[in-house]
Image (spheres, coloured by chain):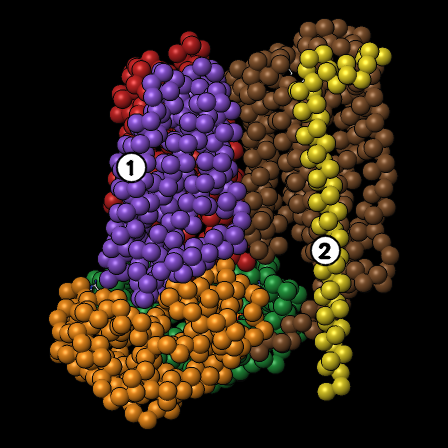
Chain colours: A yellow, B purple, C red, D brown, E orange, F green
Amino acid sequence: MNWESASDFWHMGGYGFYVWGSYAVTAVLLAFEVWAVARRGRLARVRVARDVAVERMDERRREPT
Amino acid sequence: MIGVFLSVMRRDLLLAWRRRSDMLTTLGFFLLVTSLFPLGVGPEPEQLSHIASGVMWVAALLATLLSVQRLFESDEADGTLEQMLLSVEPLAVIVLAKVCAYWLLTGLPLVVMAPLIALQFNLTPDETLIACATLLIGSPTLSLLGAVGASLTLGLRGGGALIALLVLPLYAPLLIFGAGAVDAWRAGLGVQSHFALLGACLLVALAVCPLASAAALRIAQD
Amino acid sequence: MIGVFLSVMRRDLLLAWRRRSDMLTTLGFFLLVTSLFPLGVGPEPEQLSHIASGVMWVAALLATLLSVQRLFESDEADGTLEQMLLSVEPLAVIVLAKVCAYWLLTGLPLVVMAPLIALQFNLTPDETLIACATLLIGSPTLSLLGAVGASLTLGLRGGGALIALLVLPLYAPLLIFGAGAVDAWRAGLGVQSHFALLGACLLVALAVCPLASAAALRIAQD
Amino acid sequence: MSDSQLSATRAPSAGVSLFHYASPQTFFPLAGKLLWPSWIAAVALTLAGLYTGFFIAPTDATQGDSYRIIFIHVPAAWMSMVVYLAMAFWCAVGLVFNTRLSFMMSSALAPTGALWAFVALWTGALWGKPTWGTYWAWDARMTSELILFFLYCGYMALQAAIDDPRRADRAGALIAIVGAVNVPIIYFSVKWWNTLHQGASVSLTQSPSMASTMLTGMLLMALAAWAYTIAVALMRVRAIMIERERQTDWVRQLATGETKA
Amino acid sequence: MSGSTASLIEVRALSCVRGSARLFSGLDLILGAGELMHVAGANGSGKTSLLRILCGLSEPASGEVRWRGAPAASVRDDWRSGLLYLGHRNAVKDDFTPLENLRASAAIAGDTTPGDVLLRALVDIGLGARLDVPARSLSQGQRRRVALARLLADTRSALWILDEPFTALDTGAVAVLSRAMAAHLARGGAIVYTTHQPVDINAARRQTLNLDDFS
Amino acid sequence: MSGSTASLIEVRALSCVRGSARLFSGLDLILGAGELMHVAGANGSGKTSLLRILCGLSEPASGEVRWRGAPAASVRDDWRSGLLYLGHRNAVKDDFTPLENLRASAAIAGDTTPGDVLLRALVDIGLGARLDVPARSLSQGQRRRVALARLLADTRSALWILDEPFTALDTGAVAVLSRAMAAHLARGGAIVYTTHQPVDINAARRQTLNLDDFS
Ligand code: HEM
Ligand SMILES: Nc1ncnc2c1ncn2[C@@H]1O[C@H](COP(=O)(O)OP(=O)(O)OP(=O)(O)O)[C@@H](O)[C@H]1O
Ligand SMILES: Nc1ncnc2c1ncn2[C@@H]1O[C@H](COP(=O)(O)OP(=O)(O)OP(=O)(O)O)[C@@H](O)[C@H]1O
Ligand SMILES: [Mg+2]
Ligand SMILES: [Mg+2]
């Protein structure tokens, strides 16, 4: 085990800013990417479903005439 | 007059928004040019920090030159410019609105990016602040002067190079004051005079350039 | 094939001759940009001679970027490009002819002007010779790569900035070898390898770029 | 005038479209099946890698604890290059065989590749300050990584600038391939340039005992990055498929919940 | 609109020189409210040049333009606000949808037609199914229609100056446009237009000016 | 020119998609030597799109184009050398005089018509008095004439594809052009053209394709 205590761990031998700066930014970016991709997929499906619904409404309206 | 100013500006911003990549690419260009210098010049840090503000200014200037020629080009090609000349509103106001939108799209992002480049070139925080401030005051003047050049060369082939020739001499004093401010600070001299001069240039340009540009456009369309 | 090559080249040269001022303005641009550097960087002679070849290369590169976007633009706008796509002759040959004419009009004058700039920056005759030679071999590659960028961004708004983003990364190795040659010479190292690499880049570009550009044009017109 | 467009798009003529859409349609569920295993692998490998990196690997004698940045820096740098090559590969396949799926793959890879390139630059910069005393130097490695980042940006900007997806795909493919030719050229330029980066990396491998645990951690993190890249790219390619094929029957059924995938 | 029979625009002894060629000279015309004027002439006889002089985009070589009886240069603001000019070029932005284009044109001209009137005009000219498409993807005739929709939405201008308004239009659109022109005339407006196509426009008073007679 | 009655260009089950809209589908056409085909249809019905597919500038969404009986893609060189396409845009350079423009077009197309034939064509189409003026100063109709002069000088192409050739032309020029088209047909060539103007062309065999029927 390398670390005496939690604060020792965060201190990272004096390099805390650099090490945690790297890891934090990476984590944030990856998390954002996952969120953005999931959102993109969800929106794509919602949009297609809406198009289909609109079209079916149109068809129903057209049928009686 | 305010109405037409706002709606023309909104129109130009919307047009740019339709091509969002434009904004990104101006930034990219600025970054690339400033990154190229060290490549060409060599990587010694002291030398880099010495030339930093000069390079930033030259890059801002080139980014303006590269894009300002397009300011009226598409409006000319599709006939919108004729409609602007025929508008009830003063042409100078329409021109000013277009220049403002242009500056928001190309000048402001450069100012916002400047700290990043300052970092690349090892500038201290104070120096960074001064460099950004000079760009903030100086870049609207670049846009305004560029607009005059753009309207003078409208419809001429090779406008890009011609505009550079017309406008670069006008840019020289700006470059000297702008890039000089950081050097003056480093040499321990005051920078107020530099800022005062940049501010004066901006005011004069604001008063003169829209009118000059409007006159040039009327001539170009005859 | 030779016939169409020559006549397309003649056509482009004639077109440029009708607008003689273009050639002058490209030269003017090159001169002005290189003269701006001493202004921005400060006038110490040793430092100047140190950065000279880098500045010359950066200026050549920017002069190319500034003008290459126009390579196909007017042909696209007036429908000539459609006719080129429909030609019996291979499109790549037509593109090559256009690039050659373009280089004669913008690249070659830069090479011819280079000694003048070398003088401004206090280069020795040997260094001047090397700098000019790198430009002579390197600038056709700049034009060829620029043509690919120009055809990819054809008809896209914000083409100027987009082209820079696409092409500048491709220019980086040229810049490194080109500007590095003078430094290597000054450091007493051989410059053959630099020239070999520039030459290799030119040959690869000559083989690949016209085809890539032709393909991009077909895509752009679809 | 053209009010028939709505109804016309609904029924692509059967004969050609079957062949045409075959690959996306069959690939979509396959990608769905691969998705969860990739995520699980990514999370498990990350945890293992971080544990090894922070709790097993000892402090470096010369660099202190700052070297622990290596566990993301190197995987990110590797991935940024691998992803670019994969992207260029898919583009080439698309241009040669005219398959839409491969273009979708490459546009799905680009943002993740750009992300890795950015992470490599960022972590490298943060590592450089304590080791070399500067955030940035114009060393060949760093410059080439920066250029790689710009190549990604160029590809994405070009695609975003073109409205017609078919044209965007092919134009993007051209620039990706031309860029790929450029990558090795940049890489070999190391010889003619200041080699700050290289020297530092060699000094790390001086003590073999430390290198082994360090290496394990690094490899675990590299595998985690692979798994993550695969998972995200699959997710994105599925979204792209839905966006691009929205007028086809299978996507419409999918979106309205008439089939499961 | 004044509605009086006084002249709206009037031209005396006009001559026009382009390069070294004199296109026409000694041209007089008077146009009052409700009048339709067809400017005819072969290609290159100077129709476009005349129209641009009438709206102040270029200067005549000699002669005078009068707006509502006063020298046009002295009442420039009134002159500009009384005209609507449509040239060869459409003034349509590729990146805007038809509605955005109309809004932008209105903004530039400095008029404040409400959005629903503009929308109405687009639907009337047959672009109802193309409202969400950027103009870049419109066909030649559809782009021309976007430009012409300005006419349908216009209530402010007294004089329409139309340079070949019917190019690229199909028969349906030609009918819509000529009805709009007739309505403008009926409201007391005046129109100067050029065309090489025979189109029938319903007008109480009409003139034809053949430029070939003045060259 | 083959002169046989075999088909020159042939299209089967063609469909065309633009953006998300299907313009037409299930379109078949066969055109033989000496035949004139008028492609009709409302604005935006896909006439321009069809013409561009016929000359290989764009790809159809589905269906096949055949040139002299063979799949067009496999005989691309023969296909290209057999066509002459004139689009909406004139391919006229502002800085060139009419003659220089014609020469440049010939060079680009890779054909070697001698200079006096080109000059002759320009005189025939009524630009004899405008030979020394750069195209920038020509009127709209005169520029169109420069582009159309290519047709008068052409002896090589079997198929002319003309997108609204009559726009901006005055009646004199329309007559010259329709005579040239009739002559081309009489020589055994074929023509596909679009127009919204009623123009009478002398042709032995003619077809009309109304795209509104295929949407
Ligand atoms: C912004 C700055 C930096 C960038 C862009 C960068 C880029 C890269 C790249 C592209 C690689 C992969 C190359 C390969 O595997 O051959 C890499 C690997 C590596 N980097 Fe960096 N780096 C940066 C800063 C640093 C710093 C400051 C250090 C340490 C002092 C460092 C240490 C390493 C090590 C140890 C490797 C492992 C691969 C090898 O040994 O070649 N890097 N870096
Ligand atoms: N700089 C110039 N030098 C010589 N002639 C010129 C110049 N500028 C214009 N012209 C001539 O002036 C005439 C332009 O006329 P204009 O454009 O008004 O014609 P138009 O009647 O509108 O023709 P169209 O029916 O073709 O539109 C043309 O004959 C043109 O050749
Ligand atoms: N990207 C796109 N998205 C949606 N619709 C498009 C797109 N591109 C083209 N279109 C539509 O396709 C049609 C283009 O047809 P085309 O230009 O062939 O018409 P045309 O028959 O030549 O008409 P015109 O008589 O006006 O010249 C138009 O209806 C246009 O709106
Ligand atoms: Mg005209
Ligand atoms: Mg059309």
At 28% from the left and 55% from the top, the residue drawn is B214
Residue F167, x across and y down, in percent: 39, 75
Tag 2, which secondary structure?
A: helix
Using the rendered image of the protein, determine whether residue C77 is visible from the camera's viewpoint. no
For mark 1, does the 10 Å Cα neighbourhood hold few (<14), some (14 to 19), or many (20 or more) residues? some
Residue B160's image quarter? Answer: top left
- Give the number of the disc on residue B200: 1
Residue F47, x across and y down, in percent: 53, 73
- Give the number of the disc on residue A44: 2
The count of marks equals: 2
Circle 1 chain: B
Using the rendered image of the protein, determine whether residue A12 is visible from the camera's viewpoint. yes
Q: Is residue E165 left or right of residue C28?
A: right
In this picture, is E120 found above or below D220? below
Task: For the C terminus of chain A, give its image quadrant.
Answer: bottom right
* C222 or D127: nearer the viewer: D127
Circle 2 chain: A
The CA distance from mark 2 to mark 1 is 53 Å
Q: What's under tag 2, amino acid-wise?
A: Ala
At 39% from the left and 63% from the top, the residue drawn is E108
- Give the number of the disc on residue C76: none
At 25% from the left and 89% from the top, the residue drawn is E5
Tag 1, which secondary structure?
A: helix
* A16 or A30: nearer the viewer: A16
Residue E63, x across and y down, in percent: 13, 74
* E155 or F11: nearer the viewer: E155
Q: Is mark 2 within 8 Å of ligand 3?
A: no
Between disc 2 and disc 1, the foreground one is 1
Q: Is residue D213 left or right of residue E192?
A: right
In this picture, is B6 found above or below F4? above
